[in-house]
Image (cartoon, helix red, strand yellow):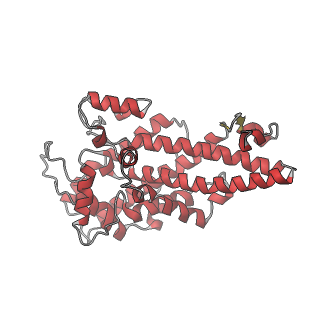
Amino acid sequence: MKRILIVAAVLSLAVIPASVSAWGNTGHRLIGMAAVRGLPGELPAFLRTPGAAAEVGELSREPDRTKGGGQPHDRERDTAHFVDMLDDGRIMVAGGPSIDALPRLKSEYDAALIAAGSDVDDAGYLPYAIMDGYQQLVRDFATWRVLNAAEARERDPGKRAWYREDRIRREALILRDMGYLGHYVGDGAQPHHTTIHYNGWNRDTPNPEGFTTSRQTHGAFEGAFTSRVARLDTVEAAMAAPALDGFDLRARVPAYLRATLTQVTPFYVLEKAGGFAESDARGGAFVTARLAAGASELRDLFVLAWRDSADDAIGWPAVKVAEVEAGTADPWLAMYGED
């Protein structure tokens, strides 16, 4: 129910379009586009095009556009956009699970929240959405690798035509799944999506610095303000260098969300100081830094998923990607199927 309050606050502002949610259309588009435009040459050529960047940018908005489908759709999807943490990384309450020690499964996470007295709908499960999206993309890339290699080697015209058609289908799915992953990674760069202070400072907690408790805070920041100040060139210029060594998905995702959590108090300090006024450059710099953090992380996850896919096995009976690419395995049954 609490996210409904955000929507209500947004709708109360005449200057903010009714369609704004999460980063807003501008923020999500820019994160997706900048990430794809930053891909290195090792990724397939179909991804390194202006069209692919634009497509992922548009598809990065999709998880917001599909909200409100009813139950169980909304329970499984709408709560994927956030995770409400305390300052120490505990989720919702002091006895809640820690972002640094998440249970293996979301069902176990829900059980831990219930045991701590939290409502599972209020806590959010953004880290699981990011991990799930990454793993899906690895599978997509593994399938594409097999189809691409098989198409290049296949001598039977009928089989080669099927490989080509299925590769094209997979490319569309890859762009879609890159967009979905991009949305959740983008949400993870927005400080309000990582904290109990998600829409004004939480009124049930101490507020010694007198931060705003306005229920218009969240929507006004990520919607109209971001749309006004954010630009693709400045986001790209602010992106970090790739960080690809020592990758561990279950460690990387919590670390990323923790880094965003550290920006919650700076946001409220800046808001109190008037940093988001139209004539103040500090607010624009804050938005640019957050969008660049999301785009940098997303770019890296795209590259890491591509690399991980080389060691994968796909289809049934499973065939190893490396063996198909080396020409030592025939993937026809694994890809086309026997029934």
Image quarter in which the C terminus is found: top right
Q: Position of residue 203 (x, y in %)?
A: 14, 47
Q: Is residue 144 left or right of residue 18?
A: right
Seen from the viewer's position, the closer of residues 147 and 211 is 147
- Tell me if residue 102 can be seen: no
Seen from the viewer's position, the closer of residues 151 and 334 is 334
Q: Is residue 143 left or right of residue 109?
A: right
Total numbered labels placed on residues in the image: 0
- Residue found 55% across the figure and 63% down from its top: 55
- Tell me if residue 164 can be seen: yes
Q: Is residue 37 left or right of residue 311?
A: left
Against 128, is 177 above or below? below
Task: Looking at this view, name the residue that lies furthest to the front.
Answer: 339
Q: Position of residue 296 (x, y in %)?
A: 48, 52
Against 23, is 129 above or below? above
Q: Position of residue 268 (x, y in %)?
A: 22, 53
Q: Position of residue 196 (x, y in %)?
A: 25, 44
